Image: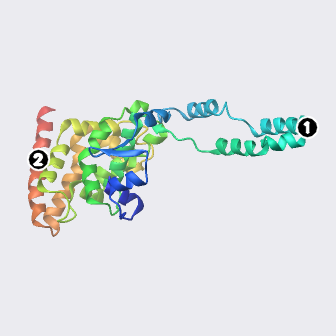
Amino acid sequence: MTAALYAKVGDLSLLTLPDKIKYKYTLLKITKGEVQFWADEVGDAIPMKCRSQSKAEEAEDEQLQSAGAVSPGEMAMVKHFLSTVCPQETYHKLEIDQFYEQKKQIRHKEQIHKDDPNTEEAKMALSCLRLLAEEVDQQSDLVSYARSNLVEHLSAVNLSLVQVDYKTTFGPYLVSLFSIDSSIDTLLNNNGLSGPSPDERRRVCQLLFNDASMDIILQWLNDEAVILNVNDEARGWITGPVRTEGRRALLMPAAMRMARHLVHEQHFVPFIKHASEFLPGFLDKVSCLFSSS
């Protein structure tokens, strides 16, 4: 959480995260490492906004929510009536004008919503993809979290409940992660000595060679809305090799990138160990796929 806040604002606070929440965000508390409301009633009182709604449904909901609001025309009508009927002294005594101004301010306040669980998972998945696919300087623990939890968040999303316009944001990142050299390097941590431990490197390899994990990625890439905004080259890769060869085509760019690193470029000792696990693992996976087909 501290790293996430640092990545968001770019400055480290002099206060620890628990102290900042205690003194600055008084509605929140930290319990066993999780940020929660002091009282469950606070969270229950915040209305839920479901991203799975269509824009027409969202507009209808907004109309229903604003149905009880007082319009400027209604305010003007009542104000005119009272100023005409009431004596001026009584009118000012009742502070009618101040009351109208308060109603205006309430009307213009932005309403706060919380996401439904499906949208929460989709947002987490998209954040993980951005951390891995974008060439930005991020805290290593955030990137580490993204490597380890991307598939978990993707698997928790019900694609049928996600709006089409939101789905389209995933496609370019997914394509980049499995086909662009810089993103593959981030995913596999091929960029230097710093980063995950050998155990974490091994877990990343195991994740990529896990059939269920790769099937989740393929499920997303098989959704036409997800790949709506990818370029023609990426679309050809998805609709061609990826959809016909499946996991083999999905992992091939990563294997080729790893092989080029190993043969043609200078590298560090941990990378040799990493490559010696990844490349045989890929070849073993490919041979299994061919033998089962």
Q: Is residue 57 left or right of residue 48?
A: right
Q: Nearer the viewer, residue 281 or 102?
A: 102
Task: Give the numbered dot on residue 84.
Answer: 1
283 above or below 225?
below
- Graded by Cα atoms within 10 Å as few (under 14), some (14 to 19) or many (20 or more), the crowding at tag 1 reads few
Task: Give the numbered dot on residue 173.
Answer: none
Which quarter of the picture shows residue 80?
Answer: top right
Query: Disc 2 marks which residue?
Result: 281
Residue drawn where x is 41% and y is 37% of the image = 119
Q: Nearer the viewer, residue 44 or 141?
A: 44
Spatial separation of the CA atoms under disc 1 and disc 2: 86 Å
Which amino acid type corresponds to the residue marked 2 in the rendered image?
A: Gly
Q: Is residue 210 left or right of residue 158?
A: left
Residue drawn where x is 11% and y is 62% of the image = 270
Which amino acid type corresponds to the residue marked 1 in the rendered image?
A: Thr
Tag nearer the camera, 1 or 2: 1
Q: Position of residue 226 (x, y in %)?
A: 41, 40
